[in-house]
Image: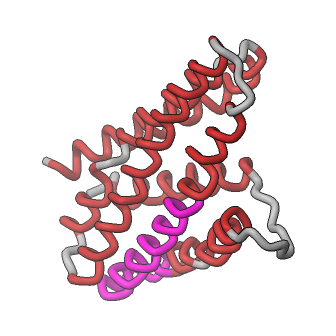
Amino acid sequence: MLITSAVILGWLGVLLYLGLALSFQKLAKLNEYALIHLIMAILYALWLPLPVALYMLLPSEPLMTGMIFGLAYLFMLIITMALQAGHITYIMKTPSQQGEYMMETLSNPFEKLANLFKSIWALFLAIAFWTAGELFMVVIMTLYSLLFFYYLSLLLSATIVRQIPRVKPNMYVTNLETLLFFIILLGYLSPR
């Protein structure tokens, strides 16, 4: 029953993500960035059962560890999106010089670390799929685990004070890879 619920909620999250992508320009034009972040917090919450459902389907010790990283990733994004929504609402109503500083504090290293955790979760998923003989999923999750190095470089770039070659974050890459990650996982879970 949990797997079915996780699939239904997961696809609702995907639909919400796609709806947000389609309405992003209009919402941005209206300065509704707080609403965008609140919707993102909700869609990440809809994906919360996925790490547990995947563990129930492919029970193994490595995937239990991976499940912890998957849940940490989702909880971190829910928290940061909700905090950013509140902060954006506040700075839109009472402009201050510290607005940008607080947004960097609430999002920059925190979101990069969360995405690092997603890459670790993907690695453990690859191991679980390997033991289950799911070669296609092994390849896909291994590729996703390689994003660890991209997010690590972004995290280091955001936190190291001395000047190092900067890696520029690309929100389109992050959003597209995140959406595809969950579509792939839901596609795997859906027929079960």
Horizontal relation, residue 142 to residue 24: left or right: left
The percent coordinates of residue 84 (x first, y second) are 55, 34
Above or below: residue 23 compared with residue 47: above
Above or below: residue 95 compared with residue 142: above
Q: Is residue 123 magenta?
A: yes
The percent coordinates of residue 69 (x first, y second) are 36, 67
Q: Quadrant of residue 37?
A: top right
Residue at x 86% of width, y 74% of height:
165
Residue at x 39% of width, y 75% of height:
125
> Is the stretch drawn in magenta largely helix, strand or loop?
helix
The part of the chain drawn in magenta is: 112-138
Question: What kind of colouring is applied to the model shown?
Answer: secondary structure
Residue at x 57% of width, y 71% of height:
144
Horizontal relation, residue 59 to residue 31: left or right: left
Residue sticking out furthest to the left: 1
Q: Observer-nearest residue: 81 or 118? A: 81
Above or below: residue 40 compared with residue 124: above
Residue at x 36% of width, y 59% of height:
72
Q: Observer-nearest residue: 95 or 83? A: 95
The percent coordinates of residue 151 (x first, y second) are 63, 68
Q: Observer-nearest residue: 28 or 17? A: 28
The percent coordinates of residue 35 (x first, y second) are 56, 21
